[in-house]
Structure formats: structure tokens, C-alpha cells
Image (tube, rainbow, N blue to C red):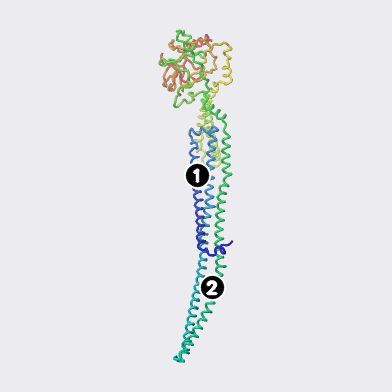
Amino acid sequence: MSWGTELWDQFDNLEKHTQWGIDVLEKYIKFVKERTEIELSYAKQLRNLSKKYQPKKNSKEEEEYRYTSTRAFLATLNEMNDYAGQHEVISENMTSLITGELTRYVQELKQERKSHFHDGRKAQQHIETCWKQLEASKRRFERDCKEADRAQQYFEKMDADINVTKADVEKARQQAQLRHQMAEDSKAEYSSTLQKFNSEQHDHYYTHVPNIFQKIQEMEERRIVRIGESMKTFAEVDRKVIPIIGKCLDEITKAAESIDHKNDSQLVIEAFKSGFEPPGDVDFEDFTQPMKRTVSESSLSNSRGDGKSEPKFGGKSKGKLWPFIKKNKGAGPEDFSNLPPEQRRKKLQQKVDELNKDIQKEMDQRDALTKMKDVYIKNPQMGDAASVDHRLAELGQNIEKLRLEVQKFEGWLAEVEGRLPMRTEQARRQSGLYEAQNTSAVNSCAQDRESPDGSYTEEQSQETEMKVPATDFDDEFDDEEPLPTIGTCKALYTFEGQNEGTISVAEGEMLYVIEEDKGDGWTRIRRNEDEEGYVPTSYVEVYLDKNAKDVYKSLQKISE
């Protein structure tokens, strides 16, 4: 099957067909180019999407990524970034292996096609020239034959006419012979030209045209093969990144499988656990039986074993549902005493760790400077050893200050850790052990004391827990006699008592102490008859009246 034999007379159609083939190739190049642009755009959008949902540095979002579910989401974002990179690889490979190669090939193809059809037109022009020569030789032979025939007829006419001279007859005969000779020469030339034309025509249709058309056919077939190979490359470029994309998807699946709901639930507990116990039952307030408490009872009602009577603030009793009171906003004290025990412990531990890291950094710098000083001492030309003494002294002072800070925070930490209730002990108490002892302890609510942030703390002191005879109405009425004063105190710092149960004090202010710190970090004070409440013990310097304190302790023993 050859175009040279089968399509010997379809030169123009072949020219149109090969041009169409080049147009198809250019169309495919344009298609691949647009595909690469789509891949790049898709990769860019994926990267922007991944970047958009990445956690901001030093933000609250960064803290949220300690949960397994959010860490899995972060892994998904990172894998999507790698996934986008594979689409960029697809674009790059298609551009270099398909678009670039085919563009160069199209230019070569156009040049080759132009050359082949130029040869075809040249061969066509040659055969047309040969045909014209044959036609001219034929017309000349035809004309000469007619001229010879007319000359012969004229001679015969002259020879038959008796009136014509012999000279005229001879002249007509010679003219007839000349014309016959010219006809014979034209015949010979025509015959030669015809043979030559037939030979050229045979070579044209059986040699030159087939060769040219064969080259055109081969060119077209190479074009078809090339576009097929490009289509395979198109698929292979995608196929090569499939394993990597599969790994990205596998990592996303692995991250999803690493999500531990139990662990996340535990992290929530660690993040928000206050260390407090839930508030006890609210006592029944019976307004049908008026009761008058004695001074001693009023004093005892503030002891740890009693449901403590609440200080009066505008005639309103303090609420019991402490966890739901709005917390104080703003900077807290240095010892984090405004936080619940568990959160305070975590903050103090974090502070201790930070200080230890700072100490280690300072010690590393000191060690480095010490070595430098030793080098300067051994090699004075390298530097002055005395130049680092000032810096070494500064580092020593910094380290000492940091160590004092660590001791201070470790002391607070030890204090907090000593107060945190043991879960097993608490469970034992809640199991009804005290009820089995038939002890009428009315301190179900006294275990909780309101802190300045509106939360409550559990009063687990190392002191002996005080128990008083059960009285249902001990803390129901606030119009009893005021509690006795057991000393005075001086406010070391300003405290804004913004929550119910606390009292605001100014630095340097002198106030009365009506209840000591029971180990929960709070001291109950009074400014006047109508203003009393709790302040952090660390905020005041207490001066207890020995006699009043002895009376207070006696009342405590009596209540036991």
C-alpha cells in the first residue's frame, strides 16, 4: 500500500491532508499546554488552601494542635501541600516532554513537508514542459506535412499545364522536394520527442512521483506515530506520580487512624480540670422558725466543720454555685493564686521549667566565657582576659536571681501539690464513711470556698477537721452578731475583689482579721460592720491578737 501508486494523481489532496495533520498536531500541543496551566493553577490553589488553614504562630490555634484530631488535620494539610507538588511535577513534565518536544517537531515537520511538495511541484513542472515540447513538435510536423502536400499538388498542377515554362515546372518540383524533406525532418523530430516524453512520463509516474509521495507518506506516518507516543507520555506523566500521590493519601489515612478519642478527652481534662470538688447540697432555709445564735455559735459557724455563714454584702448572701460565676479577667498575681488548684499547679510547673531553661542558657554562656577567658590567659595575644570578667559577673548575678525565682515558685508549687486532694481519699469520703460514723458534719458546703475568679477551692487543710452539732439553719440568716476580731492585717498589694465573697483592698490599708487562712490561701477580713470578705493570704501581712486567738481556738475545741 503506497501513496505513490495508489494516489499518483492526488497531489493537491495530499497537500491538504498533510496540512490538516500538522493542524491536528498543533491543536494537541495547545490542549497539553492548557492542561499544564490547569495543573499549575490547581497546585497553586491547593497550596494556598493548605497555607490558609495552617495554624498561626504564637496563637491560640497552635495550642489546639496538641489534640490528635487537630494533629491529624495538620498532617492532612502538609500532605495536601505535597499533593500539590505532584501536580506541579505533572505540569513540568508535560511541558518539557510533550509541549516542548512537539513544538520543535512541528517546525521540523513543516520544513520537511515544504521540501517534499517542492520536489513534487518541480517534477510536475518538468513533465508539463516535456508535454509542451511534444505538442510543439507535433504541431510542427503536422504543419510541415501540410506544406509538403500543398507543394506536391502545386508541382503536379504546374507539370500538367502546357503553358507553363519548363523553368517554372522545375522550380515547383524543387519546392515540393524541399517541403517533403522538411516534413520528414519534422516527423523524425516528433518521433524523437514523443519517445523522450513517454520515457519522462514513465519515470514521472512510476519513479519520481512514487518516491516523493512515499516520502510524504512516511512523513505523515511519523507524525501519526509521534502524536501517539505523546499521548502515551501524557498518560505516563500522570502514572509516574500516582505512587507518590498514593503515599500522600496513605499518610492522610494513617493520620486519620492515629486519632485517639480517649486521649483527646484526657487532654480536655488536663487542660480545664480545676481540682475542685462539686458544690455540696444547698441547705434548706426554713423561715418559719426564727432562731437566735449565740456569739460562740457565730464563731463556730466559720470553722471548717461548719456550714460557714456568709459575709454580708448589701444584704445578699453569697451564692453556692461557684463554678458558674463569671471569672475575673485581667492580670493575676505572680503565684497564680487566682487560678483553681490544678490549673495553678500546671502554671507553676510551667514557670519552673521555663526558669530552669533560662538558668541552663545562662550557665552555658558562662561556661563558654570561662573557656574563652582561659584561652586568653594562655594566649594573651588573642585577647584580654579581664574583658570578660564584667560579663561573667553579670551572668553569675543573673543565675543567682533565677535560682531564687525557681526556689520561690518551687515553694508555691510544693504548697499547691500538698493541698491537692487525693482522688482515692476523696472517693473514700464520698463512699459514706463519715456517715457510717454517725457524725453530723455540716461541712458539705464548707469544703468549697470562693476564689477571686469566681471559682471555688476545696478546703483540705492539714489541721484537724472541725465538726459541730448539726444545725440546719446555721448559715441561713445573716443578721446575727458579727464575728469576733482575732487580729489585724496590712495589705501588701492592691487587690480588686470583683467577685462575690471577696473584698477589695488598697496597698497599705489596715483591716481586721476575723478568720485565719485554713490552708486554702484565703484570709477573711473586715473593714467595718457592713464590709467583710476574703482576700488572698499572700496579699496581706497578718498580726494576730494572742488573746483573741486563744479564745478562738478554745471555741474550736469546744465545738469538737
Callout 2–callout 1 Cβ contact below 8 Å: no
Q: Nearer the viewer, residue 494 or 442?
A: 442
Q: Nearer the viewer, mark 2 or mark 1?
A: 2
Q: Secondary structure at mark 1?
A: helix
Q: Secondary structure at mark 2?
A: helix
Q: Residue at x 54, y 47 (%)?
A: 90
Snapshot quadrant of residue 311: top left
The answer to whether residue 214 is visible is no
Q: Quadrant of the N terminus?
A: bottom right
Residue neighbourhood size for the residue with mark 2, other residues' Cα within 10 Å, grouped as few (<14), some (14–19), many (≥20):
many
Q: How many marks?
A: 2
Q: Quadrant of the C terminus?
A: top right
Q: Which mark is residue 168?
A: none
Residue neighbourhood size for the residue with mark 1, other residues' Cα within 10 Å, grouped as few (<14), some (14–19), many (≥20):
some
Q: Mark 2 sits on what residue?
A: 197
Q: Nearer the viewer, residue 193 or 154?
A: 154
Image coordinates for residue 196, horizontal then vertical, percent:
54, 74
Q: Nearer the viewer, residue 371 or 338?
A: 338
Taking 475 as reference, is 97 above or below it?
below
Image coordinates for residue 97, horizontal then vertical, percent:
54, 52
Q: Nearer the viewer, residue 13 or 322?
A: 13
The amino acid type, in three-letter code, at marker 1 is Tyr
Image coordinates for residue 237, horizontal then vertical, percent:
56, 49
Q: Mark 1 sits on what residue?
A: 42
Q: What's the CA distance linking mark 2 and mark 1?
A: 67 Å
Image coordinates for residue 497, horizontal then vertical, percent:
43, 21
Taking 221 as reference, is 247 above or below it?
above
The amino acid type, in three-letter code, at marker 2 is Phe
The answer to whether residue 200 is visible is yes
Query: Quick one: label 2 or label 1, which is nearer the N terminus?
Result: 1
